[in-house]
Every structure is written in C-alpha cells, then in structure tokens.
Image (tube, rainbow, N blue to C red):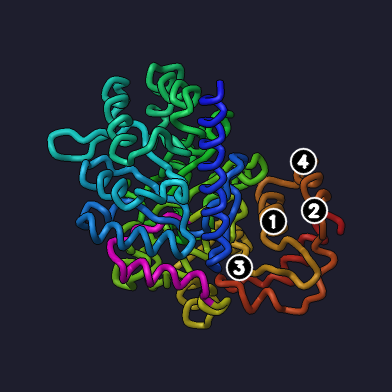
Amino acid sequence: MKKIYTLMAAVLCLMAVGCKQQTANKAATDMKYRPLGATGLEVSEISIGCGGFEKLDSAASLELMTMALDSGMNYIDIYDCTPKTRSNIGYALQGRRDEMIIQGHIGTIYKDGQHCRTRDVEECKASFQDLLDRLHTDHIEVGMIHITDSHEEWEAIQNSPFLDYVFQLKKEGKIKHIGLSSHNAEVALRAVKSGWVEVLMFSLNPAFDQLRGGAIPWDKGAMENLQGGIDPVRVELYDYCATHNIAVTVMKTFGGGGRLLDEKTSPLGRAFTPEQCIAYCLAKPCISTCILGIDNLDELKRDLHWIHATDEEKNFTNEESRNSNLDNQKSKTESGCTYCNHCSPCTVGIPIARVNELLDKAEHDGLSAELQAQYDALSHHAGECTHCGACMSRCPFGVDIPKRMDAAKAKFGR
C-alpha cells in the first residue's frame, strides 16, 4: 500500500510540474491565449502546422519546436502521417510534451510512399498507434477525423465502425476530445450540429469566406469566381460554433501555400500580410487558434511578429487595400459587410457586424419574429449610434456604417 501511495504522489508531482511549466511559459511570453471551445483547454492564438517537419532533419526540428514553445505556442496540428514528420515532431517534443496540446488526425495512413486517407478501422488503428509511438506519448488532446469534404463522406461515417473506433479512443483516454476537419461549409455545419464534434478544423481566410455553400477551394473555377461578401452558410456555421461553444481551429490561414501573401497568386488580386490574415480570422468569436504552415525558422520568426504587431499592422483598411477590396468584391447583400468585425470596437458598444448581419437577413428574407428577438437580445442597438465615424476608418470594404445603423433602427424599431 505504501508503494501505491508513493507512486500516486510521484504522478501528482509530475502533473504539478507540467502545469507549473505551462504556466511559467505563458507568463514568460506576450502570446495571447483563447479557450478551445468547451474543452477546458487554452490555446495560443497562433499555432504550428506539421508540414515543415518533413523537410527538416531532427536537429532543425528541435530548433524550430524550441523557438515555437519558448514563444508561447502550445498547439500543433499533425495531419501528416509520414514517418519522418511524426518522428521529427516526437524528437523535438521530448522533455516538453506537457507544454504542447496535440491535434492529431485519425484516418490517415502512410501507404506506398505517400500520405493517404482511409476509413478502414484496422488501418486507422495501426496508424494511430504509430502516431503515439513516434510522439513518445500515450494520448493526444484532440483526435481529428481527417478531411470530410462531401455530404456522401459525412453520411458514410455515421453509425460506422470507423466512428465507433473514434468514440472508443475517447473512452480509453487515448484522445481527450473529438474533432473533424473539413473545407466544405455545408458539411462542417452538419458536423457541428451532430452534438459530438468538439473541435472543428476549417479552412478560413478572406478569400475562402467568399466561396459559396458547399464549394471547396479546389473545385473547378471556385477560386476564379468569388462572388464577394461572406457566404451565408459560413455565417451560420461561425454563429453556431460561437453560440454552442464549439472550437474552430483555422487551416489555410494564408490561403493555402501562402497564396494570399503574394499579389500574383492572391485570389483577391492583392497581397495580404500574415498579420492581416490572422487578424481577419481571429476577429470571429468562434476561432480558437490559427494553424500556420511553417517550413523554417525564418517563417516562424515572421509569423511570431503577430505577438507584438500593432493595430495598424493587423488592419487592412488603408486606402490602397480598401480600393482593392472594393474593386474585387461585389457583395450579394446591400451592405457589402462581411461581418469581419474589423470595425470594432464601437465607441458606444454596438455589435456592428451582428447588427449588419441581422439587417441583411431582414432585408433579404423579411423581418421575422425570430430575427426581431435576436436583435432585441443584443446588449446595444443601432439607435444608439452617434455617427462618430470611428468604425468607418477601420472598415476594409467601405461600408457606410452610420447609414446602415440608421436603416437597422428603422427596421427593428430601436
């Protein structure tokens, strides 16, 4: 019995050391943290993707991970199942595993020399155990169902042995929380409404928000025919996640391969900075962290500038960018508002983006009792607008916000 108590004390001591280490790291950095939905975990606003580790050796992997951890990053996505990637990350995390929250993917296998997706349970079991072994751990915090992009795929995993296996992993404590990754807003919305998805990994940035309905970035012509204004399905998705405390971890923050960072490849016809892309995503209340594809130390240093970036660096509302946005976006709504929240904070507390969203819905579909109730429940209303114009200086789309507040007051009565 004495041995048992001694062992329990040792375990509790190790847990306490881990907690103190995480607290010390947070205290030593200016990184900001956000709740990971209802999981009870707190994650850094920017986090690290795994793709670069396949290109590095073990020494360079350790150097990259050390800088990330020392800077306050505490979240990593591991979708890549190639042995080198997993082994490099495991090597780099040795001795500091407790400082990193791991989002690992279920349904990926390394086959015939390449990364593949699978729903075969036996293949998934072998690959997941390989992940744990190479990471030198017995669990991960988030078990992410790998890429579900079509309604057919979503239907196929319902009541399937694959999904049973995911639930089993959680029951056994090998994953603490269940997630799902998708690039399709319609499928993602179905997933978060299922009741069992705790973390959604979703592709989000200023360009992808203009994809319509179930379109995904690599659909033929999808990125060449952006229609302007945020897609209504995405608005519903983000609202649902925010109101139901479901975490969203962002992939493709820079447009996939950094397309948004280069004017020549940007679907919006202009280059964004990393700070602007990150700020765009984090403006949405459902977002927990932006996962960044980082290939080397220089890219990590570039992205870590976010920690100390000024409001001006995060803002893309200068005249050049505003004109570019207006030229490249033709909103389907009257307002042209994308509900990005860059207009905030309002000097009198009006939730401007939410008011614009409700007004757009009322103008498009008619004022319903439900919309009126949602508007009435707001802490401040459009009628309180003082026309100070502070919001106008920050709007990237040139929306006449005071005019919209007047319209909302007329529509909703206050």
Q: Are marks 2 and 1 in contact (CB under 8 Å)?
A: yes
> Mark 4 — residue?
370
Labels 3, 4: front one: 3
What residue is drawn where x is 40% and y is 61%?
Answer: 68
Q: Is residue 305 magenta?
A: yes
Q: Earlier in the sequence, mark 4 or mark 1?
A: 1
**Residue 301 x/y as whole percent:** 38, 71
Can you see residue 184? yes
Mark-to-mark CA distance, 3 and 4: 26 Å
Specify the label residue 354 is tagged with: 1
Q: Are marks 2 and 3 in contact (CB under 8 Å)?
A: no
Q: Amino acid at mark 4?
A: Glu
Q: Which residue is mark 3?
A: 342
Asked if residue 106 lies left or right of residue 110, the reply is right
Q: Secondary structure at mark 1?
A: helix
Q: CA distance from mark 2 to mark 1?
A: 9 Å
Crowd tier of the residue under label 2, counting other residues whose Cα lies within 10 Å: few below 14, some 14–19, many 20 or above = few
The residue that mark 2 highlights is 378
Q: Which of labels 1 and 3 is toward the front?
A: 3
134 falls in the magenta region? no
